């Protein structure tokens, strides 16, 4: 019978993987694992947190990435697996989430959405039509976006400076993405296109 690790150890291994990716390619900001309020020990929040406050990942030359994942360690045939239950990744120009005019896009994922018609993975845009109509509350379906894809979007589309040569950064992201595809646990559970 395989040896079971404590759920916090499983989550912390994932956090170290994320930190090695983010610190190698993007920023010196660190993610931490925090107990999810009211949830079991196997359920943890992953975010950038310091001095009792949730902080964004600072990007260069400008910009901020708010990173928040809710994960859970579950028992699977053959051992334990870490499942991402939800994530919210917000890119913007302010280090305050209260600055509603500064965010650019927000990717969200919910393994078990409870709103009728809300896609599991979707994109929000801080965009307004010339008529004054706002798109920010609309859920544009995307498919699940990996951390590697998110970083690649920041480097390519928003010209965020990587911490290494840009070609080397993309090579690192490609290699890490290949591992992400192999580790995914939601591919065995094909969700309907909407609840």
Image: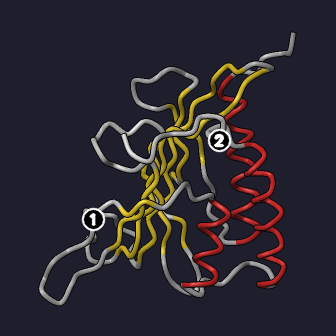
Kindly give the residue lying farthest to the right in the view shown: 1
In this rendering, the answer to whether 105 lies above or below 117 is below
In which quadrant of the rendered view does residue 155 lie? Answer: bottom right
* Quadrant placement of the C terminus: top left
Dot label at residue 98: 1
* Quadrant placement of the N terminus: top right
**Which residue occupies the foreground of this view, 175 or 21?**
175
Tell me the element at label 2. loop
Left or right: 115 in relation to 49: left
Q: Which residue is located at x 48 percent, y 49 percent?
A: 87
Left or right: 2 in relation to 147: right
**Which residue occupies the foreground of this view, 126 or 38?**
126
Q: Which residue is located at x 35 percent, y 72 percent?
A: 125
**Which residue occupies the foreground of this view, 168 or 120?**
120
In which quadrant of the rendered view does residue 129 lie? Answer: bottom left
Q: Which residue is located at x 69 percent, y 53 percent?
A: 18
Left or right: 74 in relation to 180: left
Of circles 2 and 1, the one toward us is 2
In this rendering, the answer to whether 38 lies above or below 175 is above
Q: How many marks?
A: 2
Q: CA distance from mark 2 to mark 1?
A: 35 Å
In this rendering, the answer to whether 78 lies above or below 24 is above
In this rendering, the answer to whether 3 lies above or below 81 is above
Identify the residue position indicated by label 2 in the image.
187
Kindly give the residue lying farthest to the top in the view shown: 1
Tell me the element at label 1. loop
Q: Position of residue 153 (x, y in %)?
A: 59, 75
Q: Which residue is located at x 80 percent, y 57 percent?
A: 178
In terms of sequence position, does the residue under pointer 2 or pointer 1 come before the other? 1
Kindly give the residue lying farthest to the left in the view shown: 131
Label 2 close to label 1 by CB (< 8 Å): no
Q: Position of residue 48 (x, y in %)?
A: 53, 54
């Amino acid at each position: 019978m395989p040896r079971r690790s404590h759920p916090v150890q499983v989550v912390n291994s994932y956090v170290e993987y994320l930190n090695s990716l983010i610190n190698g390619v993007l920023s010196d900001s660190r993610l931490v694992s925090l107990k999810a309020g009211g949830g079991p020990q196997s359920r943890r929040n992953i975010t950038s947190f310091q001095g009792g406050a949730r902080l964004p990942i600072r990007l260069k030359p400008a910009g901020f990435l708010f990173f928040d994942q809710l994960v859970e360690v579950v028992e699977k045939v053959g051992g334990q697996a870490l499942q991402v239950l939800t994530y919210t990744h917000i890119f913007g120009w302010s280090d305050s989430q209260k600055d509603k005019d500064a965010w650019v896009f927000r990717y969200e994922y919910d393994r078990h959405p409870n709103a009728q018609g809300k896609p599991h993975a979707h994109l929000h845009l801080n965009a307004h039509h010339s008529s004054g109509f706002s798109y920010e509350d609309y859920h544009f379906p995307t498919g699940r976006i990996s951390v590697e894809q998110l970083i690649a979007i920041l480097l390519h589309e928003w010209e965020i400076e990587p911490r290494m040569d840009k070609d080397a950064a993309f090579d690192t992201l490609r290699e890490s993405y290949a591992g992400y595809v192999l580790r995914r646990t939601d591919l065995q559970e094909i969700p309907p296109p909407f609840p």
